[in-house]
Image (cartoon, helix red, strand yellow):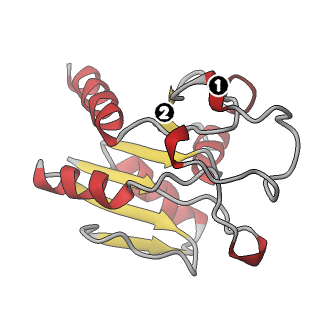
Amino acid sequence: MKICIAPYAAKLPNDIPNPKTPPWWPELVARLVQDGHEVIQLGCAGEPEIAGVSDFLKSRPYGEIEYAINEADAWISVDSWLPHFCATLRLKSGIVIWSQSNPRIWGYKHNINLLKDHAFLRPYQYAHWFDVPYNPEAFVSPEVVIAALYDKLAVATA
């Protein structure tokens, strides 16, 4: 199966780690590849390529991204541009990884929204991200993402 991933949220000023980006993407990609999936990374110039992806569609036109999503069996993204892109174009639903922002405010009900715990949500959801400390514990584990993906794929092929 072909899986698109959008693993990074926008880079913040002064190289502050973005609190929306989980630290375990290499582990997740390795597991997907080990299980026989083709992984396509979507992103912007300046983002590192994750080892194991078969292609990195970096800073591509919207039409190419739309095509990649339509050709994929599923997509996984952090709380960033891809869920909004897919919702705007009415593309297939996906899996969104949340940390400190609230999917009830920023998410879409048709996606699988993975939030580890409401206790990690930042107190004021409308503030900028520059002062939010990075917390690697705020994310669900790769195993939770894999389980959600396989549930989604099972439903899609049923």
- Residue 146 in the image, given as x and y percentages of width and height: 28, 37
Instruction: Say left or right for 36 vs 88.
Output: left
Instruction: Say left or right for 134 vs 26.
Output: right
Q: Nearer the viewer, residue 76 or 93?
A: 76
Q: CA distance from mark 1 to mark 2?
A: 26 Å
Q: Residues within 10 Å of mark 1 (few under 14, many from 20)?
A: few
Q: Determine which of the numbered discs, if any, sits on residue 93 in the image.
A: 2
Instruction: Verify CB contact (< 8 Å) between mark 1 and mark 2.
Output: no
| Quadrant location of the C terminus in the rendered image | top left
Q: Amino acid at mark 2?
A: Ser
Mark found first going from the N terminus, 1 or 2: 2
Image height of 14 relative to 114, above or below: below
Label 1 or label 2, whichever lies nearer to me, is 1
- Disc 1 element: helix
Instruction: Say left or right for 70 vs 128.
Output: left
**Which residue is drawn at the image coordinates 12% and 48% (left, top)?**
35
**Which residue is drawn at the image coordinates 66% and 44% (left, top)?**
84
Q: Amino acid at mark 1?
A: Ala
Instruction: Say left or right for 6 vs 126.
Output: left
Task: Look at mark 1 in the image and give the residue it sits on.
Answer: 119
- Residue 143 in the image, given as x and y percentages of width and height: 28, 36
**Which residue is drawn at the image coordinates 44% and 35% (left, top)?**
140
- Residue 79 in the image, given as x and y percentages of width and height: 61, 44
- Disc 2 element: loop
Q: Determine which of the numbered discs, if any, sits on residue 138 in the image.
A: none
**Which residue is drawn at the image coordinates 68% and 75% (left, top)?**
15
Image height of 156 relative to 65, above or below: above
Q: Nearer the viewer, residue 132 or 147?
A: 132
Count of numbered marks: 2
Q: Quadrant of residue 55?
A: bottom left
